[in-house]
Amino acid sequence: MKVRDAAIMPTKKSFPPRTWIVVLGTVPGFTFSMTWILGKTCWEAVDADDPRRVCATVQAHAKASGKRNGRGAPADVAEEAVRYR
């Protein structure tokens, strides 16, 4: 085997610096985590019988199950509200 080109040490560092990469990854992660914790704490502080919480829970479960707004009888919605309390 023959070496075609000898290795050359770089004279200038590459961009962006590692510190920037670490900071730009840590700050959004920390912000997201704190927002999630604060939101979860506030959500758990709301009473389970609060109409806004019941409505949001029913909508979230309907969205997760693939149902669309306006589909299904009103009895189905009332049944889901009772089931997810």
Image: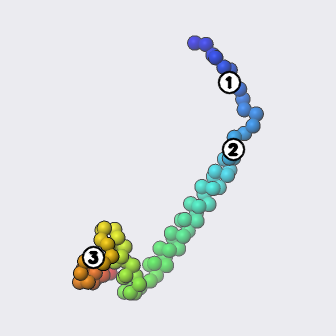
Q: In the image, which disc is placed on residue 15?
A: 2
Q: Which mark is nearer the camera, 3 or 1?
A: 3
Q: Earlier in the sequence, mark 3 or mark 2?
A: 2
Total number of numbered labels?
3
Res. 77 image quadrant: bottom left
List x then y, in percent, for residue 23: 65, 55
The residue sitting at 69% across, 47% down in the picture is: 17
Residue carrying label 3: 71
Q: Residues within 10 Å of mark 3 (few under 14, many from 20)?
A: few
Report if residue 83 is visible in the image. no
List x then y, in percent, for residue 69: 33, 76
Q: Quadrant of the C terminus?
A: bottom left
Q: Quadrant of the N terminus?
A: top right
Image marks 3 and 2: residues in contact by CB distance under 8 Å = no
The residue sitting at 64% across, 17% down in the picture is: 4
How far is mark 3 from mark 1, CA to CA?
A: 68 Å
Q: Earlier in the sequence, mark 2 or mark 1?
A: 1
Q: Is residue 23 above or below residue 42?
A: above
Element carrying mark 2: loop
Q: Is residue 25 above or below residue 3?
A: below
Element carrying mark 3: loop
Describe residue 50's horizontal placement relative to residue 21 as left or right: left
Residue type at mark 1: give it: Ala
Residue type at mark 3: give it: Arg
Residue carrying label 1: 7
